[in-house]
Image (spheres, rainbow, N blue to C red):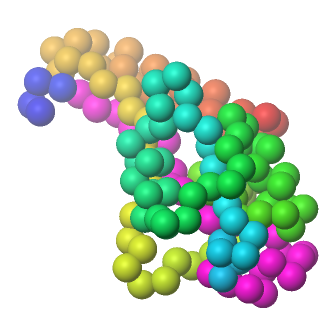
Amino acid sequence: MDRFYVREVVEDRLGLFVSKRHPIAQMGWEAIEKFGFGSLSPGKDGLPRYFTKFVRQFEPLKPFILSDSFEALREAAIAGALVAVLPHRVAKRTDDLLELTPPRGKNEIGEHRICVVSLANCDIKETDFLAEHARRILQTRVLFG
């Protein structure tokens, strides 16, 4: 690892979210069994490993809705139709969602990071600049996207 220079851009984690304004919020963990949950649909390369590990811990339950859009899942959760698997950065764009606390034994939290990695003997200032620029773009996307 001494040969690499790593600069973290952003960190996030996955969670299960329901609408605060609908009866689904009062059901707690049972909401998953009664309403099911929605998840990101796999792309041509599948799902990222952190996402697969997070969802796999809820077996034998399977997602009943798959979407290629976190925003669509978020809106379905706000409508009280399902429990949505969302990154915190997406879920926190609204105050209408409540995170469900998993029962004991469900310990995978779907942590993930985006980093800029370069060789340690490369221009570190350029790597820092790229990481900072990527951070600004992602923050702008969260605020306005």
Looking at this view, is 109 or 47 the one in front? Answer: 47
Q: Quadrant of the N terminus?
A: top left
Residue 103 horizontal/vertical position (percent): 49, 83
On screen, residue 114 versus residue 29, left or right, reads left
Residue 84 location, quadrant: bottom right
Q: Is residue 116 visible?
A: yes
Q: Is residue 116 above or below residue 81?
A: above
On screen, residue 33 versus residue 53, left or right, reads right
Residue at 63% over, 50% down: 39
Counting the numbered discs, the total is 0
Residue 17 location, quadrant: bottom right
Extent of the magenta region: 5-29
Residue that sits furthest to the left in the current view: 2
Q: Is residue 95 above or below residue 138?
A: below
Residue 57 horizontal/vertical position (percent): 43, 64
Q: Is residue 88 visible?
A: no
Residue 31 painted magenta: no
Q: Quadrant of the C terminus?
A: top right
Residue at 44% over, 38% down: 48
Q: Is residue 6 above or below residue 83?
A: above
Residue 67 horizontal/vertical position (percent): 71, 40
Residue at 90% over, 62% down: 79
Residue 61 horizontal/vertical position (percent): 55, 65
Residue 7 painted magenta: yes
Residue at 68% over, 44% down: 66
